[in-house]
Amino acid sequence: MNNIVILPIIIPMITGLFLILFRRNIKLQFLLSLISLSLTGISAAYLAYQVKESGIQTVQVGGWSAPFGISMVADMFSMILVITTSVVAIAGILYASKSIEESRKRYFFYPFYLFLIVGVNGSFITGDIFNLFVCFEVMLIASYILISHGGTKIQLRETVKYVLVNIVSSALFLVGIAYLYAITGTLNMAHISMRIAEVGQDGLLTTVSIVFLVVFSMKAALFLFFWLPGSYSAPPTAVAAIFAALLTKVGIYAIFRMFTLVFYHEPHITHLIIGILGAITMIFGAIGAIAYWDLKKIIGYNVIIGVGFIIVGLASFTAVGLTGSIYYLVHDIIIKALLFLIIGTVITLTGTSNLKDISGLIRLHPSLGWMYFITALSLAGIPPLSGFLGKIFITEGSFEANLTWLGAIGLISSLMVLYSVIKIFLYGFLGETTISEEMEKGSTKGIMLPIAVLTFLTISLGLGGELLAPYVNIAVDSLLNPI
């Protein structure tokens, strides 16, 4: 038993509770939040090292042994995601410290930001399916506050839609848990896996698996993505960036975990359905990305395309496909945060999200323009940037699993991604400068550091992907050999 496993949850939770006492001391709240997220990342990195050296680390909360108590489990897959979460959370909070008004920060912005990270990390680490539901709800409650934080008309409208969708998915989640408990008699995910392996995955369990797939698809914006473009365009840039980077990834993680640990016995049914949903998601996401001239809609639909593409690796259910999915998950968390921060900065400078009203920004803001160009190429999977490795492995995995049609759709969607993001560069950054420095509505002062750091990371992950390979291989092995 290793008590360090719970630190990525405990550190931001205790800090968030402590910050409530210092509502008016904004600088202290920011400093403590930054320290908390840094310690969370350090503890996750240490756990990843322990997993590499000694295998999967666990802790039984309250001293109750599994499967009766709540288990927290740190394997390499979850630790890679917790580390990446900490990195983008630090970038987000650095951006928020300079871009969000103090009047908003006083109303518990930093505590709820940390509570969101508590829910995300808890979802990655828990080994108990009911506790997964609890961590989802912690994350969602914090996101309800953050999406409506400020109380503008668009925020309140999108909050209603966002809350209703998640209430429905949470209710279905409980239904799925109830059926699974009734069939297996346990809530511990490893124990559920052993029970199903003993008796086999019959028609009823396959039906239950579809219920879970619907639940997590709603949360991950897999096929059921109608709520995402509007919801992610409503909150402030820093919040939208952390939403785009993390919230859909928690749903994706849950799909990966359930369909590699629990429901992996009938892949010709479950994983084929997952592949079809991924294909539909990529197709409709690509159509949305190239159809709009609104910056918020373009990047929102690019989030949807990424979800569909990551799922292709799971649908293939091959080692190379899962390797690609993990590489691409790390890439997508970083690149979506970066994309939203850059586009949010552009909207702040120009006062509009209509691409037709923006031109020539690169002359006044060359560093922002060229960092966006790098982001666009990475998003499309152009070598040697971070998106390339994941796309190559996922496509190879789909071909290896005789899902050539799925790999082809993924490649075509990548071209659509490239078109949609290069369109922003050509029209928004190049061309005649239509907005002078005096006409700008905002400033880049103090907000370029997190953008620069994330840009450096997407380059580094592409050039140094081999350094990550031993950790990714361990993660893939744990997914393919769950028991």
Image: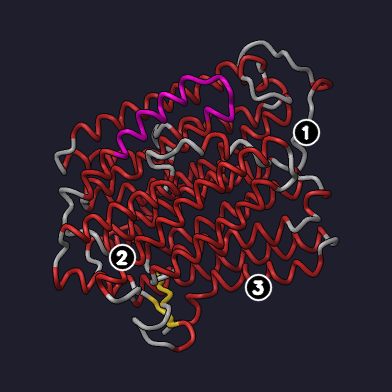
* Viewer-nearest residue: 47 or 226: 226
- Residue shown at the point (71%, 58%) measured from the top left: 110
Quadrant in which the C terminus appears:
bottom left
- Disc 1, SS: loop
In the rendered image, the vertical position of residue 419 relative to residue 477, given as above or below = above
Structural distance between the alpha carbons of marks 3 and 1:
34 Å
Q: Nearer the viewer, mark 3 or mark 2?
A: 2
Mark 3 surroundings: few (<14), some (14-19) or many (≥20) residues within 10 A: some
Q: Amino acid at mark 3?
A: Ile
The residue under label 1 is 443
Residue 287's image quarter?
top left
Residue 365 falls in image quadrant = top right
Q: Is residue 46 magenta?
A: no
Query: Could you say where residue 372 lies in the image, as x and y percent from the top left?
Result: 57, 31
In the image, residue 477 lies at what x, y percent?
26, 62
Residue lying at 76% horizontally and 67% vertically, measured from the top left: 20
Foreground: disc 3 or disc 1: 3
Between 61 and 325, the one nearer to me in the picture: 61
- Report helix, strand or loop for mark 3: helix
The numbered mark at residue 179 is: 2
Question: Who's the residue at 78% across and 53% down the image?
Answer: 105
Left or right: 394 as drawn, with respect to 350: left
Q: CA distance from mark 3 to mark 2?
A: 34 Å
Badge 2 marks a residue whose secondary structure is helix
Q: Give the residue pinned by disc 3.
A: 14
* Contact, mark 2 vs mark 1 (Cβ under 8 Å): no
Residue extent of the magenta highlight:
277-298
Q: Residue type at mark 2? A: Tyr
Is residue 107 found left or right of 139 in the rendered image? right
